[in-house]
Amino acid sequence: MAQATPQGGRQGAGQGTGQIATQGAAGTVARAPAPAATPASKPASPTAQAEDIVVRAARNNRMEVTSGGQLGALGTKKGLDVPFNIRSYNSSLILNQQSQTLGQVLENDPSVRTTMGYGNFSEMFVIRGFPVDGDDISLNGLYGIVPRQLVSPQLYDQVQVLNGASAFLNGAAPSGSAIGGNINLLFKHAEAEALNRITADYTSSGQGGGALDFGRRFGANKAFGFRLNAAGMDGETSIDHERRHDAAVGGDFDWHDDNTRISLDMAYQNQAVNWGRGGVFLGSTLTSVPRPAAPSHNFSQAWTYNNLNYLFGMLNVEHDFGKHITVYGAFGAMSGQEKGTYSSVTVSNAATGDGTIGSMFVPYNEMNESTRAGVRAHVNTGPIAHEINAGGSALWEDASTAYAMYYQPTAPLATNLYNTRQIAAPAQNWVGGNLNDPLRSNWTKLYSLYLSDTMTFWEGRIALTGGFRYQNILQNGYNYASDDSLSTHYNKGAFTPVVGLVIHPTHNTALYFNRIEGLSQGPTATGANVVNLGQVFAPYQSVQYEVGAKYDTGRFSTALAFYQISQPNAYTEPYGNNGQLIFRENGLQRNRGMELTVNGEIIRGLRFNGGFTLIDAALVHTQGGLDNGHTAIGIPNYTVNGNIEYDLPFLKGATLIGRVVNTGKQWVNVANTQHLPVWTRFDLAARYTFSVGSKPLTARFGVDNLANTRFWASAFNGYLLEGQPRTFKLSLSADL
């Protein structure tokens, strides 16, 4: 059970450096020590030494998912000790599954579904029925630093998923998403043991690449650490003609003594997609959903592409003043340059697949800075132990863009979803802004202050958390398509509270409750005949209530949660008797659900990670009552993920892996007259760890979508995304 001790402050302080492994906090990747030496008259035989190398390497290669992670203002915590549902997926899982995107890592999570950004090749995630945009993924607790369209996961030690609203914990997300959950990344840092790992990868139909992972600690007490990661992949994917390129390199430096921890992390990432298969829109006159194309068929055009370049990094500092007080600070920045020509299919005939396409070229530049500072103190008042957290954060975003599109309503570009013909790239006759030097489109400043107290009593069996954050959202919009003059201005703030309760019936169980909010920019009154035209509304405050139970023995954990999230909306309604309207905050989307997750070793050599979710995403008090009680677009009524690993007892180092992903029915339109059917995907894989001399090697082979099933994977925002075809993966890693 939770114990209120001064040492707990150092565990919680991990939010500054992200060095969970060295702090011993939640999310630590347990490295198996070598067996203790036993008296013997002669050294172990070469065969026994080789077997020992294989056993240790195979153990380190296991699928690792831990309960706990970084909780923003509260620091790094074990899952059993907090009133929230958080999991961490570690770097060995990323390596073993040959994950090339963040979405592929999160295929392990039953509460997350991945879709595609609106009209481009970016990844968007759906948690508890609400989106998490790429702009709103945090890095070591800071927003605005992560590359915003596609993320190379090879640079990160952990991918953490927090289910539920988090405005108090993390502040408002820059683009206003992350209402139903948060995704946080932690950089890799050097561990106690030296690491020299090289990896070669191949993915069908012709993608090849590799990775380097180098780590060392130096100096007295190994105080200095350096970690270098480099990864790349290039070639044709399993989708016909689609080519993807990925190059990422990161350097991570850290230093610590008994009281101070400092880390500096810097990274560069370049990703490119050529002839990428995009999403599909449905024409407004359709009454049914077209069947998916053949799994590997590419219905896009050869001239579509994007190119994404990001340089980013952050500095973290922590210092302990005695045993009871820790101060921390962080600063990060990101510079991004993007450009691409995009085209989406709009189907007008569901039976034949006939439709039209467009063409749009978009350059986009972004410069962000983000910071956080705070103090964490442990004090006792009689029988009650307090952990007090106070601090603040700020984010500045400066974005520039332009566009050039083909627009000819009387001469649309014809295409077909199933028999796609290639056409010449059309002349883009509608240009907005400066394509060579884009003008400023948005300038955003988010700043906040937070304060909380976690009170622990009854010998650590009960922990009660109360607190609040004041969040201000300032955003200016500019006429980037013309003279770059100020077009919109928003400057509003809100207090967002939190209440959480954890009760430990036993040392490895917990019952919990939370009431917490999500926060996003409020609307501005618009429309014809609106009496309050231009009125700026306060930030939307989405409210979450959650209760749940957890069980965690270290080797095995499970969590059960029930929740409700209510997100407000706004629309116009009649005002008076003279045909006027008034714009008001009206209606809401109310998502209610249940989540069950299971992770760990069921019996010796058999491990499982997965679970299932149920969700009812209802629209309430809609405009005119037309859609009251309907289900929100693109939110499946249930999801199931199951990942299993089995170590073969008759062949040391060999492991078989299986995965099933099952997603329930999704509505495509608000009227709930069109839907996507249930879909299921099966994956199989195997890995084998062996030794050459004294060095362990691991070979991996996997097949995603084993049956080559064709299916629409997502309809979020009414934008259809087809599932990936059968894909073969092969890799070989060597620890030198």
Image (cartoon, rainbow, N blue to C red):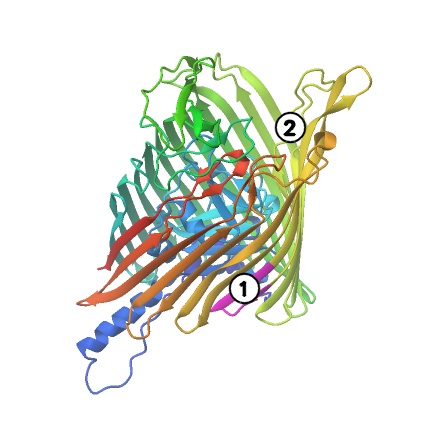
Q: Badge 2, how many Cα within 10 Å: few under 14, some, many 20+?
A: many
Determine the secondary structure under disc 1. strand
Residue ID at (40%, 12%): 429
Tell me which corner region of the image, top left, top right, bottom left or bottom right, holds residue 684.
bottom left
On the image, the x and y values in percent for residue 223 come to: 35, 58
State whether residue 202 is above or below residue 361: below
- Depth check: 674 or 225 in front? 674
Looking at numbered disc 1 in the image, what kind of residue is underneath it? Answer: Thr
Most frequent secondary structure within the magenta stretch: strand
Which is in the foreground here, disc 1 or disc 2? 1
Tell me which corner region of the image, top left, top right, bottom left or bottom right, holds residue 539.
top right
Tell me which corner region of the image, top left, top right, bottom left or bottom right, holds residue 45.
bottom left
**Which residue in the protein does label 2 denote?**
523
Residue 558's disc is: 1
- Depth check: 611 or 507 in front? 611
Residue ID at (34%, 38%): 269
Q: Give the range drawn in magenta.
A: 550-560
**Are dots 1 and 2 in contact, CB under 8 Å?**
no
